[in-house]
Image (cartoon, helix red, strand yellow):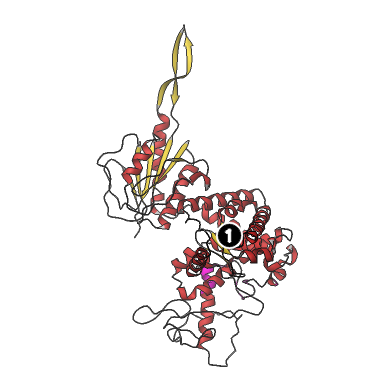
Amino acid sequence: MNQDIRKKAREVVAGARGIIKAAAPYLDGEADSFVWVWVDGIGDTFACDEARRIYADPAYVVKVGVGTVAADFLHEIVVHTMGDHFKRQRAVGVPEAHSKLWNIAGDAAGNHIVREIAALSMGRITPGGIRINPGTQVDDFAKSQWVTAHGLNLEEGTTVEAMYFELAERESKKQEQPKGDKSQSQGDKSQGQKGQKGQSQSQSQGESDGESDGDGEGQGQGQGGGKPKASPINPTLPPGMKPKACGGCAGDKRMTDELREKAKAQGESIPDERSPIELEGIRQATAQKIKAAADGRGNVPGGIKRWADDVLAPPKVDWRRELPNLVKRGVSLAKGKVDFTFAKTRKRAGVINPTMASFKPRVAMVFDTSGSMSDADITNSIVEGVGLVRKGGVDEAWIIACDTAPTKPAKMKGLSGKSIKEVLAGGGGTDMGAGIRAAAKVKPHVTVVFTDLDTGWPTEKPVGAGEVIIVGVRKSNCPTPEWARKVLDASK
């Protein structure tokens, strides 16, 4: 382990992070959220996993310098991580055998954002070592050898899913062609309907490795009985275009798992996984900064602004409609309460009289982080809870995460990763009663519990919890206590 080369590599990374922040200040929280894991001997491999750990060879980082590392780093941030390509791959059902194709589709869908930010950086961010000028950025970027939608004859600005299916369709048609028939070139756009007679006949004649595991085709769909295993797709790209192998953040989890094991074997310490709650806080904070920059006529690429609009859009969950009304009801009752206080007094005829003081509404939010809650459940809960605070009417908000044991209540001061760093993911059993008792310590007027309902409940409401609202984040037949108000998911 060469400590000297690692020290130099850390200096390059610090410089790269500074360049990104200067060109796109709204990405400062994102840039600071990534941690670096050094892996000797992997050359120009530059990959990132879902936990925002970047795996890189320190010798490569030092060799290429600040500008190229800034471009590689920016790619992992804005293309794959902010693009949620690892989650979207699962949602679409992209098979592992198509991970290379999905990675290429992700590059094509998002690299124009890197290009635009590089053009704003005054030549300091250099993809592939190439300076990107504002007036000639498309042509300049092509020299970088990075994958582009333009170079693949795809429409820039479309989704990663659309690009993946388009590329998979092309590969399927190429495999159907008789040997020697080159009438359909790599760059041609496929306009026909998704494969019919040839889709279930993908043979071991794939042009890259000659591998085949069964009857699958480029879209991971099969015909006939059972689900066929997809054939690997390793597409041939146009000359002068080199795809990046980005690992787990781009859908290839196996790659970054192997890099992590290699780093461990070399004696590197591996940073811990990140809480879904913490990651969502970073994501929301970034979206707000982007919106503020765009509203202030800052130089924000259109793709980045659309991303922020999507993140800040109300979540499409059924219980969202009723929840704000219940919270407002509890808050309104709290605001209407008054009491006497001697903190501020009036003197009348020599007698000190107390004044009337209104309570400041406090809301405590308990997030179920047990093993039965999916990342999507936790993310939707956080987004919705933050939305309640943002809409106003709440003077003070506290957050607690709970599986079988609660975290210490953390006061939410704005929306950032730092404000919720105490709220860590659980993963074991579930006891929401413990979470409500923890919430009661801050004496809230309203306690909102976000859970999948797979939990037991106290027979009586914990003292000091205020009005308790239980939010079922997905449909469930599990019972809820009579002493709480319920907002249950009515989805199918």
* Residue that carries the numbered disc 1 in the rendered image: 77
**Amino acid type for the residue under numbered disc 1:** Ile
Left or right: 380 with respect to 111? left
As for residue 77 lying within the magenta part, the answer is: no
Q: Which residue is rendered at x = 64% and y = 66% of the image?
A: 59
Q: Which residue is rendered at x = 30% and y = 50% of the image?
A: 455
Left or right: 276 with respect to 368? right
Which range of residues does the magenta coloring cover? 143-164
Quadrant position of residue 224: bottom left
307 to 364, vertically: above or below: below
Work out which quarter of the rendered image holds the C terminus and state it: bottom left
271 to 45, vertically: above or below: above
As for residue 157 lying within the magenta part, the answer is: yes
Residue 394 in view of the camera: no
Q: Which residue is rendered at x = 65% and y = 61% of the image?
A: 5
| Residue 406 percent coordinates (x, y) | 37, 45
| Residue 248 percent coordinates (x, y) | 50, 66
Q: Main secondary structure of the magenta part?
A: loop
